[in-house]
Amino acid sequence: MNAHDENRIKQLLKQALPPVESGAEPERDLWPAVLRRLDADPPRHAVPWFDWALLGGLAVFVASFPATIPVFLYYL
Amino acid sequence: MIRKGRRMPDGSSNVPDSVLHRFRAGDLDGFEALFREHQRPVYGWILRIVRNTAAAEDLTVETFWRIHRARDRFQPEYPFGPWARRIATRAALDWLRAQRPEVELTAQIAGALPSAPTGNPGIAAEIRSKTALAFGRLPSSLRATAILAVVEEQPHKEIAAALGITVGAVKLRVFRALRLLRKDLEKQGITP
């Protein structure tokens, strides 16, 4: 793609998607929405239930077949 | 009451350091002071990427929620503005990835977004429409980079900082976006 093509594509793009006004601002006060979002925030560092399930399954498997531990370690 | 200050060219502000430290410690008043100071530039930056006013408002809320959640990682000795912009950019990119191009760009084609005059009135509406749709089919990372660099004419350095990439990578993404756009337009019978 030469410089002329590049400039032409840029021109087409600018005409198709005009720039946003520099002074754009929200039409409403967003702080109440931020507060609502914070209230709905789940506890931090919460571990999903399926992670616990996976960990439990792995523990049961390892306890049942301890000979597989070196195999796991080899592939880690 | 926190005094609102003038924003610096690098996106930082003269919010007192104590406010930044209070925000990091989880103080809600400190967070609100930062929100009041930075919501407009964050909203404007997101709007430039997503080009949808309703989505930009929702993403501004999402961004400040992410900012609050990540406050432990904020380093008060660095400016808040660029850090907030990086988080806003990630939120906007997540939104772009989740959108279908045809839906996303409808508002722009219809001219619903407040914008500057298009300049050349002679350009056919069909070409504009096809260009916008072709642009919407680009990967979201290329779209965001190209729209900030080409349409919004933001400095490459600022785009690089917001996207977490180098200036060279910004230039490469713009080049790739324009090349893919040209190929798409050629398939549609439009020869630039």
Image (tube, helix red, strand yellow):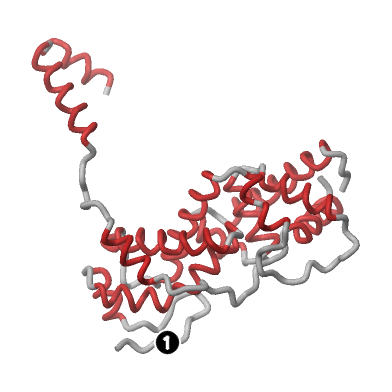
Residue toward you, B69 or B11: B69
Residue ID at (74%, 45%): B181
Query: How far across and how far down the image is residue A17, in percent?
Result: 72, 59
User: Which image quadrant: the N terminus of chain B?
Assistant: bottom left
* Chain containing the residue with disc 1: B
Residue ID at (60%, 54%): B144
Q: Is residue B160 left or right of residue A52?
A: right
Query: How far across and how far down the image is residue B110, in percent?
Result: 72, 58
Q: Is residue B11 left or right of residue B139?
A: left
Image quarter of residue B170: bottom right
| Relative to B76, residue A69 above or below | above
Residue toward you, A65 or A33: A33
Residue ID at (84%, 48%): A2
Query: How far across and how far down the image is residue A38, in percent?
Result: 29, 61
Say what secondary structure mark 1 lies in: loop
Image quarter of residue B84: bottom left
* Residue that carries the numbered disc 1 in the rendered image: B5
| Relative to B139, residue B2 above or below | below
Q: Residues within 10 Å of mark 1 (few under 14, many from 20)?
A: few
In the picture as drawn, the residue positioned furthest to the left comes out as A63
Three-letter amino acid code at disc 1? Gly
Query: How far across and how far down the image is residue B83, in percent?
Result: 41, 65
Residue ID at (46%, 59%): B59
